[in-house]
């Protein structure tokens, strides 16, 4: 988690907001569940969840697979 400052249009106005971004590492199979959970618990009407495909080293991927069962 890290603080960010965002500029975005919301309901006809530009918002200059202080937010926190979270970078979460998981398997593709978990993305739908994460999107649903963020939507359920987030205070924003339309939270942003971005799915970025990336490659990682084998040892790390093995660990993620083991922990994601």
Image: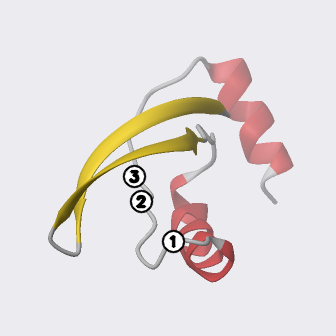
4 lies above or below 6:
above
Instruction: Decide: few, some or many residues near mark 2? Use Cα within 10 Å; few <14, some 14-19, many ≥20.
Output: few
Q: Please state which of the two labelled residues, at mark 2 or mark 3, is closer to the viewer.
A: 2
Tell me which numbered mark, 3 or 1, is placed earlier along the sequence. 1
Residue drawn at 53 percent across, 63 percent down: 31
Residue that badge 1 annotates: 44
Q: Are marks 2 and 1 in contact (CB under 8 Å)?
A: yes
Residue drawn at 71 percent across, 24 percent down: 60
Q: Are marks 3 and 1 in contact (CB under 8 Å)?
A: no
Q: Is residue 35 left or right of residue 40?
A: left
Residue drawn at 45 percent across, 27 percent down: 55
35 lies above or below 8:
below
Q: What is the x, y in percent for residue 56?
A: 54, 22
Q: Which mark is residue 48?
A: 2
Residue that badge 3 annotates: 50
Q: Nearer the viewer, residue 7 or 47?
A: 7
Q: What is the x, y in percent for residue 47?
A: 46, 66
Assign a secondary structure to mark 3. Answer: loop
Assign a secondary structure to mark 2. Answer: loop
Check the picture and name the quadrant holding the C terminus: bottom right
Residue drawn at 38 percent across, 42 percent down: 52
43 lies above or below 54:
below
Q: What is the x, y in percent for residue 39?
A: 55, 77
Q: Is residue 16 left or right of residue 66?
A: left
Q: Are marks 2 and 3 in contact (CB under 8 Å)?
A: yes
> Quarter of the image holding residue 42?
bottom right
Q: What is the x, y in percent for residue 57?
A: 59, 17
Q: Please state which of the two labelled residues, at mark 3 or mark 1, is closer to the viewer.
A: 1
Check the picture and name the quadrant holding the N terminus: top right
């Amino acid at each position: 988690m890290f603080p960010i400052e965002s500029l975005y249009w919301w309901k006809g106005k530009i918002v200059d907001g202080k937010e926190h971004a979270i970078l979460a590492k998981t398997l593709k199979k978990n993305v739908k569940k994460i999107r649903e959970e963020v939507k359920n618990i987030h205070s924003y009407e339309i939270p942003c969840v971005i799915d970025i495909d990336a490659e990682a080293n084998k040892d790390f991927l093995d660990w993620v697979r083991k922990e994601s069962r």
